[in-house]
Amino acid sequence: MGAVWLGALGVFGVFATDVGARPVPTGRFVEIPFGVSVQHPSRTGGVDAQRSWRTDARLPERAPTELWRARVGLGRATTPAIAQDGTAFFGTVSGLSALTSEGAVRWALPLGVVNATPSLRPDGSVAVALGHGQLVFVGAGGAGSRVPLAGASWGSPLVLDDGSVVVGSGTILQRVDADGRSMFRVSLSENLTGTAALSGEFVVVPVGASLHWVGLSGQPRRVVELGANIAAGPSINRDGEAWVLTHDGQLIRVTESGRIAVRTVLDGVRGSPATNLAIAPDGSVRFGTLTTGLLNVSADGVERWRFERPDAQISGPVVVDADGHALTVEPGGDLIAVGADGSLRWAIPLEARVDVAPAVAADGTIYVSFVQGEVHAFR
């Protein structure tokens, strides 16, 4: 199924204001949306603003079958953001595309390289970071505000409740309002080494071997030195605490006050970093590496189990569902579901290489994005 490139008018009518958002009254008695609705099953990279990689959807008990496949653009397709109505937004080398839940290309915009999962905003529009150093808002009228960045941004934009957006590029963390006007620019000591996550009234960013807490007005709050460079995270749990994994194999949990509450050295993890940390509903953490398979570590840092397969390693990104079951991909291998108890639930052979996380829609449909710009849906 080929994409059809549309101009700005071709996008009109696709986006609708989220009726589930909280209204904020203004002097003109106009209600404006506040906050990205939690009814959207996957709102940004890492599922939510906390980058928890935890979805409220549930994985199927048995191996699903393929529903459809579609081409969304050129080159590598990102993990999609998925709206409440089932619309899935994908970035590719050629731009941004929207697919219906039936696999039809609703529209596509040739924006340039979109290198990370798009992010949904409270008004139903989408924010994407472009490879050439721009932040773009795409709404009912097509591509709107274009905000120049300090450099290329390689993560999903962090959308806050008021529609403003935080992005990192190089050593600069910046926030722009809902219309793209600058709110702050903060210079950090080194380049950001991951994507910003939200912890209460602070943005948490990984910088080399440290985590930085920055207030929503741009004021630096604290820096926590970890002793080794960050390989994965931060992922924020429901208490606002940040989980990270370092390159030397330490899994660390840092409280909102900056105290290191857990520091666990895991056997076999050193030098084989994970791509992400997924936080299950009980607070435990899932991640995979090239050498250890899929690990489950409790909230207090105790390893519970490892899931390994003799014929393939599990190093792909992990998503955890509402019951604590994990969904992941083996590079060049299978799409697999691992139960909360560490047992294999099912596995589906994939036809091509996958290096991004699968995504789960509200009805349990699983989207898998391939490096050649093709998407397969399973249910």
Image (cartoon, rainbow, N blue to C red):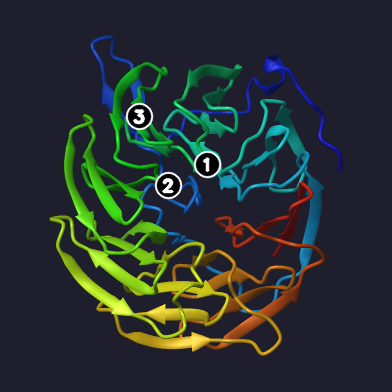
As drawn, 189 above or below 326: above
The earlier-in-sequence mark between 1 and 3 is 1
Q: Nearer the viewer, residue 122 or 287?
A: 287
Quarter of the image with the N terminus in it? top right
Few, some or many residues within 10 Å of mark 1 (<14, 14–19, 20+): many
As drawn, 188 above or below 176: below
Image coords of residue 373 (percent x, y)? 76, 46
* Alpha carbons under labels 1 and 3: distance apart: 14 Å
**Amino acid tagged 1:** Trp
Q: Is residue 8 left or right of residue 56?
A: right
Asked if the residue at tag 1 contacts the one at tag 2, i.e. Cβ–Cβ closer than 8 Å, the answer is yes
Q: Nearer the viewer, residue 305 or 141?
A: 305
Image coords of residue 313 (percent x, y)? 63, 79
Give the image quarter of residue 329: bottom right
Residue of label 3: 174
**Amino acid tagged 3:** Gln
Give the image quarter of residue 123: top left
Question: Element under label 3?
Answer: strand
**Amino acid tagged 2:** Thr
Which label sits on residue 366?
Answer: none
The earlier-in-sequence mark between 2 and 3 is 3
Residue at image location 48% in from the left, 45% down from the top = 43
As drawn, 165 above or below 142: below
Q: Is residue 38 left or right of residue 65?
A: left
Residue of label 2: 195
Question: Element under label 1?
Answer: loop
Few, some or many residues within 10 Å of mark 3 (<14, 14–19, 20+): some
Give the image quarter of residue 363: bottom right
Which label sits on residue 154?
Answer: 1
* Alpha carbons under labels 2 and 3: distance apart: 13 Å
Q: Nearer the viewer, residue 64 or 137?
A: 137
Image coords of residue 234 (percent x, y)? 36, 56
